[in-house]
Every structure is written in C-alpha cells, then in structure tokens.
Image (tube, helix red, strand yellow):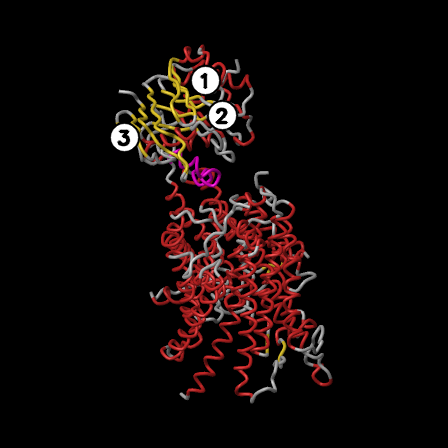
Amino acid sequence: MGIIRVFHFLAGFTITTAIYAIFALGLNVHWGYTGLFNIGIAGFFAIGAYTSALVTSPLPTGVRANYVQQIVGLNLPFPAGVIAAGLISGLLALLIGIPTLRLREDYLAIATIGIAETIQRVFNNERWLANGPQGMVGLAQPLGGLVPPNYYNFVYLAIVAMVLAMVYVALERGIRSPWGRVLRAIREDEVVTEAAGKDVFRFKMQSLVLGAAIMGIGGALYAHSVRAIQPSVFTPLFGTFMIWVMLILGGSGNNKGVVLGAFIVWGIWSGTGYFIDRVIPVAWAARAPFVRLLVIGLLLLGILLTRPQGILGEEKQVSRMM
Amino acid sequence: MAELLGYGIVLGSIITLGAIGLTLVYGIARFGNFAHGDLMTLGAYLALLLTTNVFPALGISDSRLGPLSFGWVMLVSFVPAMAATGLVAVVVDRLVYRRMRRLRVPPVMLAMASLATAFILRSLIYIAWGPDFHFYTPGLRPMLMLPLGIKLRPDQIFIILIAWALVVLLYFFLQRTKMGKALRAMADNADLARISGIPTEQMTTWTWIIGGGMAAAGGILLGIDSQVRPEMGWILLLPLFAAVVLGGIGNAYGALVGGLVIGIVQQVSTQWLLPAYKPAVAFTVLILILLLRPQGIFGGG
Amino acid sequence: MSLLHVESVVCGYGEMEILHNVSIRVEKGEIVSLIGPNGAGKSTLMKSVFGLLSAWQGRILFAGDEITRMKPEQIVRRGLCYVPQVDNVFSSLTVQENLEMGAFIRDDDYRPRIQEVYDLFPDLKGRRGTRVGKLSGGMRQMVALGRALMLDPHMLLLDEPSAGLAPLVVELIFERIRAINQQGVTLLIVEQNARKALESSDRGYVLVDGQNRLEGLGRELLADQQIGELFLGR
C-alpha cells in the first residue's frame, strides 16, 4: 500500500470525522451547554444537506428534467450553499422550538425524533421537493478545478478543517461570554435561573437555533463531500445516534472533548469495519454493519455506566451566581 | 371510511399493548423507555424462532386454525415469547437502569441509556436474523366482509380479540390483586409506597416483566398482521409515545384509550395523506396534546 | 427504657447541617409534640428517625434496638410508622385500597384491622370505594392516618397532621389522635399549630434553629410565658 494511498485514506477519514465533529459541536450547544435532549439531529443534518444541494445545483433542463424534480435550483457557489444551509436549518429550529421548547426534557426528545422522522418522510415522498427517494446527484465540488481529481480530497479536507476550526473558535468564545454563562446556568438549574430574572425561553431558543445552524452547515459539507444525497442516508443511526456517542464519549460540555470523541468513535467504526469485513464469512456480510452497530451501542452504554462525563469530562462549572 | 376505522382499531389494539407497557414503566421506573419498540420487535422475532425453528425441530407439526393464517403452534408460542421478552427487560433493568438509579442520575440519562439499549437490541436482531423481512406463514389471506362495509381478515379479528383479552387480564391484575394494587400505588406515589414498606425494587422488576410481555404480544400481533422486520418496533415508537402522552403518563387505562385513538387517527389520515406519513400524524397529535393538555386526557389536572 | 430515644443527633441535607445535637425521648403510651418555628428542624428530625435521612452523628433507639441508619423498609417492620406532611395518600387509589396498601407487608389476615380502622374513622366507612383524590382535606388526613395504622404500630410519627386543614377539622383530627393513643399507640407529633398540639400532648419539646430549647409537660409549656409569646400569639 503506497504512502499516497494511506494519505488518501486518512484524508477521507478525516473529512468524515471533521464533519461529524461539526455535528457534535452543534449537539454540544444543545445538550452540553443548555441541556436540550435533541434526538433529531438527523433532521437538521438532512435540511442542511438538501438546502445546500438545492442552492448550489441548477434546475434540471432538457432530457434530465424528465427524471429529476427539484423545487428550486439556484446554481449559486458553494459558500452560498453552506450559509443557506445554516440559515434554513436555524430557521427550522426556530419554528420547531416555538411549540416544543417549553416541554420537559424527555418530551422534547420525543418531539425531536418526530421532527427528524417527518423531515425524512417528506423528502422521500414529495418528489417535487428534491427528487424523492432517488435524491440529488452531481452536487457541486468547491474549488474542483484546482488540483487533479485524485488529489481533490486534500482540498476538501482543507475546506472542512477550516470550517471546523471556525465553528470551534466561535463556540469557545461563546461559552466564555456572558451569554454562555447563562446557558450553563440554565442547564444546571432552570428554575433558579428563571427566578434570577433571565428569560430562559429566549436563551434556549438561541441555543437551539445556533446548534441547529451548525448541524445544517455540517449537512452541507457532507452533501458536497459525497456529492449525492438521498433520504435514506439520514438514518437515526448515522444521523443521530453516532453523534450522541461521540458527544458522550468525548465529554459533553467540552468542545475539545467532543471533537476528540468524533475521531475516536469514527475510528472505532472504521476500525471495526476493516476487521470485521475481513473476518466475517461472505454469507454474513450483510450483517457486518450491525455487529459494528452493536459495538457502538455497547460503547455508549459502557460510558454511561462507568464514566458518564466522558473522557475529557465536563468543564468546570461556571458560577451560577449572576 | 368504515374500512379505515376497522383497520385503525386493529392497529390501535396493537399500539395499545405497547403503550400500556410503556406507560407502566414510565410511571414506575420514571423514565421514557426508548427501547420499548424494540422489545416489541424482540417478541415478534422470538415467536418467529419458535414457530419456524424450534417447534419444527422438535418434530411437532402444525395445523391451521380455521380461517386464521397460523396454527396452534403460534398460539402456544405467545407465552414463552412474552416471558422471554419480559425476562430480557428485567435483565436490562438489573444491568443498566438499576445501577444508574442507585447513582441517582437524572431521568434523562436513563432515557439515553434506553436509546443505547434500543440500538443494541436491534443490532442483535439484525445479526441473528439478518435485514430481510420474514412472514410467520406465507400466502395470501382472504378478507371477510363484515357489516357496515368493514373489511377485515380473520387474523385481524383475532388480533383485536387477543389484544383486548390481554388488556382485560391486565385490568383484573391491576384492580384485584395485591401486587397490581401495589404497582398502581407505586406509580401514584413512590415515596409513600416505600414508607409503607412496599418492596419497590421487586415491584419494578414485575413492571418490566409485564411491560416487556405486553410489548412482545403487541409485536407478535403486528407480525401476524404484516411481516416481521427488524425496524418494526422502532417505527412504532412515535405512536407509542403519542398514545402514552395522550392518555396521561403512568395511566394504564389512558394508554388503552390513547392507543386506540392514535391507531384510528393514523389510519383515517390515509384518506388524505400517504400511509408513509402515519408516524407524522401521530407526532402531530403528540405535539397538540403537549401544547393543549400536557397531562393527557386522564392525567390528574 | 423509653420507646424512642433520640440521642445527640446531628443531621442535615447535602452540606447543610440542620440538627445540632438534638435529643428527645418518648415513653411508651405518651403523646409527645415537637414544636418550634419554621426551619427549626422538626421535620428533619422526624425524617432522620424514620430513616429517610441518615443521621450524621448520634444514635436513635427504638424499643432498645439501634435503628440509627436503618432504612424505612426495615423500621416499618419494627412497629414504627410514619405519616408525611404532604403526599401522604395514594390519591388515585380508593380509601379501601389505601388501607390495603398500608397492610401490604402483613402476612396475616388484615381484614379485622381494616374494620378497626373504619371504627376509628367512621366517616370513611361509607366512602371506601371513593378515590382518595376526590376527598376533602380532613378525610384525606384520616386516610393517611388509617394507612399508617394498618400495621398495628407501637408508635406513629405524624408530620404536621393539621397542615392545610380548617380549624373544626383540626379539632376532629386531634380528637382522633387522642383516640388512637387510647388504643395504646405512642405518638410523636411535629406541629406548627403549637397550641393544638400541646393541648393533646403529655409532653413537648421546643426546637429552635436545630437545637433543643425547652422541654416539659404539655400543660406546663402551654402556660409558659416564653412559648406564649413565640408561638401561641400572646
């Protein structure tokens, strides 16, 4: 295996990990900072991916229009797609938050499952939106002409790494700001924070929208990395559960931890894939992914039972006195 | 419309079985069990194992029961499948939730653990049986024409009868037996139950057995009605929670009504919406209830 | 030997110490009241006796046996029962079912005992099938007392039995408490309503800021100048 191939593999691996890390950072805003139990990450992921796809792709013309339906095709450049993804995802969060944010934690969780389910089904059944089950293909490749095609991965890696760094820095700043302190206080004790005069609902909404926007951006980056998306991609496993494991393993409430968690969990997923694909008899190949799912599930349980604060633990509590 | 109503009652009866177990666990173990749908799936697959592998291996041959699509072997399989699922539920409680209870974690962490459990159970099922669909018995099933224009298969009438038989059994258990009353007492006021000397850990164990058993029964009935597939229970999770919230958390009779209502509403909605949107309909009902009357129809105001 | 002997107990919640070296004794057959201002630690003391809170220091003895760190499930079997101040009934269960739950750990026939409890609270007899949540405050308190009596306890701990009740009903409840005592049950009562409590008590303790302040016979404390100013509104 040539050294170049190793680098290609690592680039691909890191791209996926970095995208997941962005999702996980978004979830950290929800759960780690504000205590919002969001099990519908896949919904924001999907909206972000589809928004970027629709914004950056042209409307189908000619023969192609017979097979592909889209609601819009703005054919704008990649950055517009990413920004739009964040905005629309945030907007969706705003709309969802209005009826659901005042709910108890577990009710919110169920509501988020419902939202993700609904979004997936809508995209799957309403062909006029984004081509239904066949989804959209041939998505834009930012800076595609810059290098020979087989080195493109590195370009995309740079793009994703830059976005990840920007999100990370912005969040680290945010958590140390007065705004961040209020969020922490809400997570610790909502009642006390409300009594201290803070409009808890407004802060929760801001957190919901921000986290969702970040997830939307992640979705956009995902879409342009694989360049083809269908509703079946945004599953509860890959779109939601995996990210939760990354968050809990790495340390909820800790941005560094969350990024670390993304690397470790995706590493375990890829690693088990590599080994199991070699070990498993061909007849059972269809079941291989589920052995890996079992490992991930047991990993999460293990952490919850032994070290629920995750590897890097939670950052020291910011004082509740305001 | 009558046809939709009829099938809505069939589906609603299945949802009720799951919802009753879910609401009991909610009231006693005090968290929303996201693995409940997968307990239904487990029950269905265990029945599959018994009817298509174990009994034939023992050389026992089956014969169809009248117009039903299955035979007495399936009937017999209900009990061990329900018991085994109840046992799995208890084991999970002992290994996971009880430990977390001792550490006094907030309920949301228990819910998260149940989410992990859901994926673990499902992946075990995928590993053991693969991702394909299975049928308990192959072949077409004819419809019966009933009054009022309702068309139901004999299987579906069986489903309604069995589901309600189980509900009635549970009713008698909760109303007339010492253990049943103690369970209701615990759901009502766990601290007072403890103060009265009621063994709360034992009660929790029984709740899991009953909840798991009812879920298994619901899963088997669902399998009889359609097919047995690994995602069958997870797909029902939204309707289950909607039914539980509609009826009031911890209220078994509320879950009964809730299950029927959700089943019927979902089915009637297919008059105007694609069947794929049924969970979305359940979800909408859930949100409406949470906004208008969060304690549910029967919840204490 | 006292039936209940609380010896120099130190106790609290989390890091906060509420009781600082509190001692009380209750002799068999007595009614003893614990009075004092809000936050004095009266409920805390009761909870630590019944095992709902672990005493940090000191000893608690019941009928000569040490129960200091025992759990409620074990204490209840020794004949010491507790009626909390709030949430002291199963509101979605009927009167009859509440009493049956009180008798849960009995392995003999509890039906004669239920009869005795109904004789003690005749108002409940006609309502045995009613959901307790639908009953008035006074009735609910009777159910709460009845539930605790089902195990034939030697001693009852009552946490503010008059809380939230109208004066006439309070009178009735305390009259029933005296009747319970006549049947041989020893009682320790925590009360905000100091007058009513002391009127029915053999002896009383005054707790202030988590410490013993005064102790004496019921009627003595009732007549006492200090207490009069502090609690009886004179």
Q: Give the range drawn in magenta.
A: B182-197
Q: Name the side, left or right, on which C120 lies relative to C168.
A: left
Please report the residue visible at 63 percent of the width from the left and 44 percent of the height from the top.
B293
The answer to the question of whether label 3 and label 2 lie on touching residues, with beta carbons closer than 8 A, is no
Q: What element carries label 1?
A: helix
Q: Mark 2 points at which residue?
A: C141
Distance between the alpha carbons at the discs numbered 2 and 1: 16 Å
Q: Where does the image place residue B185, in percent across and percent down from the top left?
A: 46, 37
Q: Which label is found at residue A122?
A: none
| Residue under numbered circle 1 | C197
Which chain contains the residue that carries disc 2? C
Quarter residue B150 falls in: bottom right
Using a 10 Å C-alpha cutoff, classify the residue at mark 1 as few (fewer than 14 neighbours), some (14 to 19) or many (20 or more). many
Query: What's the amino acid at mark 1?
Result: Ala
Residue located beneath label 3 in the image: C66
Residue at 52% across / 45% down in the picture? A321
Indicate the quadrant containing the N terminus of chain C: top left, top right, bottom left or bottom right: top left
Residue type at mark 3 is Glu
Disc 3/disc 1 C-alpha distance (Å): 28 Å
Query: Is residue B146 visible in this depiction of the protein?
Result: no
Which callout, 2 or 1, points at the residue further toward the start of the chain? 2
For discs 3 and 2, the disc positioned in front in the rendered view: 3
Q: Can residue C130 be seen in this view?
A: yes
Instruction: Please tell me which of labels 3 and 2 falls first in the chain.
Output: 3
Q: Determine whether the residue tagged by mark 3 lies in a helix, strand or loop.
A: strand
Q: Position of residue A26 (x, y in %)?
A: 55, 63
Chain name for mark 3: C
Q: Is residue C67 above or below residue B98?
A: above
Measured Cα–Cα span from mark 3 to mark 2: 30 Å
Q: Is mark 2 on a helix, strand or loop?
A: helix
Relative to B173, does residue A173 appear above or below in the rendering? below
Rendered view: B287 above or below C28: below
